[in-house]
Amino acid sequence: MRIQDVIRRPLITEKTTLMREVENTYAFEVARNANKIEIRRAVETQFKVKVAEVRLAHMHGKERRQGRYAGRQPDWKKAYVRLAEGEKQIEFFEGA
C-alpha cells in the first residue's frame, strides 16, 4: 500500500480537538486494510513529526433509510495518533 493511500482524511470534532490540545493526539480516517506500522510511517513522512503511539478503532457503518428503501454506509477504520513528547503540532490542523 502506498503511503499516500493510508490516511483518508483528518477527523475534526469537539472530542478530537480537545484530545489534540490536552494529549497531543490526532484522529484520522484511514484505509481499512492499513495496520499500525503503515499508519505510523504515513503520519511521520507526510507531516514530518515523530509518532509515539497509534491506536485503532473499527467503526461500523450506519444503516440509512429513504422511505421504504434501506441502505448501509460502509464500515471504516479510525486511528488515534499520539505524537512524541516535545513534538510540534501538525500544521494541517492549525487552520481548522
Image: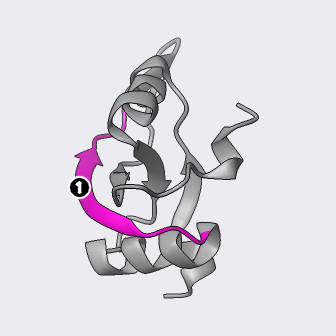
Identify the residue under disc 1. Answer: 55
Quarter residue 59 falls in: top left
User: Above or below — where is 84 with respect to 68?
Assistant: below
Q: Which residue is located at x 41 percent, y 55 percent? A: 86
Q: Give x and y (percent) for residue 16.
A: 43, 30
Q: Give x and y (percent) for residue 69.
A: 49, 24
User: Above or below — where is 32 with respect to 60?
Assistant: below
Specify the farthest residue to the bottom: 1
Nearer to the camera, 81 or 86: 86
User: Above or below — where is 11 with respect to 33?
Assistant: above
Specify the farthest residue to the top: 67
Q: Secondary structure at mark 1?
A: strand
User: Above or below — where is 90 with respect to 52?
Assistant: above
Q: Is residue 51 magenta?
A: yes
Q: Give x and y (percent) for residue 82.
A: 34, 53
Q: Main secondary structure of the magenta part?
A: strand
Q: Which residue is located at x 25 percent, y 61 percent? A: 53
Specify the farthest residue to the front: 86
Give the magenta-colored segment's residue range: 48-62
Q: Give x and y (percent) for residue 50.
A: 43, 70
Q: Is residue 25 magenta?
A: no
Nearer to the camera, 72 or 30: 30
Q: Which residue is located at x 52 percent, y 39 percent? A: 11
Q: Is residue 87 left or right of residue 61?
A: right
Nearer to the camera, 40 or 78: 40
Quadrant (top left, top right, bottom left, bottom right) of the C terminus? top right
Badge 1: residue crowd in 10 Å (few <14, some 14–19, many ≥20)? few
Regarding residue 58, the answer to whether it shows in the image is yes
